[in-house]
Amino acid sequence: MTARDPDAAIRAAALSDLPALQAIEEEAFAGDRLDRRAFRHAVLSPTIVALVAEARGALAGYVLVQLRRGSAAGRLTSVAVAQAAAGRGIARLLLSAAEAAAREAGCGRMRLEVRADNAAARRLYETGGYRRFNTVAEYYEDGEAAWRYEKELG
Ligand SMILES: CC(C)(COP(=O)(O)OP(=O)(O)OC[C@H]1O[C@@H](n2cnc3c(N)ncnc32)[C@H](O)[C@@H]1OP(=O)(O)O)[C@@H](O)C(=O)NCCC(=O)NCCS
């Protein structure tokens, strides 16, 4: 069981977070990265929930959820945590805040894709109540497959 960071707090992302969001992105992903423009769009878009975690005075992670008009499913498009803040329950906290925001926006379930070789993220989702319902071959830039997960938000 991951220990919780007692100082971690979740809030909506702001434009002033863009440099820190990009730094986390570069540290977290080798490819398929979001650039500054994509983060800017996410922060400003009324159909994207963009949340950040702050811990010990620094940005520790973020999560993005796409809300599609007319769809009952929110799509969790990315979650990442700074290496310096890993293993303290920040991703779990972000995931649960993202689910609450999607539920509040009227979504009955959450969907997401994860790299088949990303064991840590798959474990995060599987222990968080997500079930795999599909795989998509050659989904990522480097040809890796995606596993698709879904969770009923109740
Ligand atoms: C995956 C990631 C978001 C986890 O962030 P984190 O804040 O360290 O995770 P938490 O401390 O909240 O851990 C939550 C759960 O995730 C899983 N997990 C996290 N890190 C793990 C690791 N290194 N190995 C195995 N499972 C891991 C565990 O199930 C853990 O719960 P448990 O310890 O109670 O079993 C983080 O490692 C990351 O940013 N990775 C790079 C980006 C990425 O892969 N994002 C997901 C894209 S779909």
Image: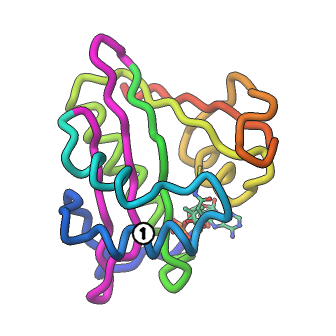
Q: Position of residue 138 (x, y in %)?
A: 79, 34
Determine if the magenta segment contains residue 63: yes
| Residue at the spot 71% in from the left edge and 42% down from the top edge | 140
Q: Position of residue 101 (x, y in %)?
A: 25, 40
Against 136, is 89 above or below?
Answer: below
At x 62%, y 63%, the residue is 29
Task: Please state the horizontal and vertical placement of residue 15, each as a whole percent of the image.
Answer: 19, 63
Q: Residue furthest top?
A: 70
Write the residue at 39% across / 75% down. Answer: 60
Residue 68 lies left or right of residue 27; in this view the side is left
The disc labelled 1 sits on which kind of residue? Answer: Gln
Camera-side residue: 66 or 23? 23
Where 104 falls versus 99 (above or below)?
above
Disc 1 crowd rating (10 Å Cα; few below 14, some 14-19, many 20+) is some
Image x and y of residue 97, in percent = 31, 51
- Left or right of 76? Residue 144 is right
Ligand 1 located in image quadrant? bottom right
> Does ligand 1 reach within 8 Å of label 1's beta carbon?
no
Residue 121's quadrant in the figure? bottom right
| Quadrant (top left, top right, bottom left, bottom right) of the N terminus | bottom right
Front residue of this view, candidates 136 and 34 = 34
Question: Disc 1 on helix, strand or loop?
Answer: helix
What residue sits right under mark 1 in the picture? 22
Tell me the quadrant of the picture where the C terminus can be found: top left
Magenta residues (range): 47-72
Colour pattern of the rendering: rainbow
Residue at 67 percent across and 64 percent down: it is 30
Which residue occupies the extreme front position in the image?
A: 37
Query: Across the whole image, how many numbered discs are drawn on residues?
Result: 1
Above or below, 26 relative to 116: below
What kind of secondary structure does the magenta stretch mostly adopt? strand
Residue 104 in magenta stretch: no
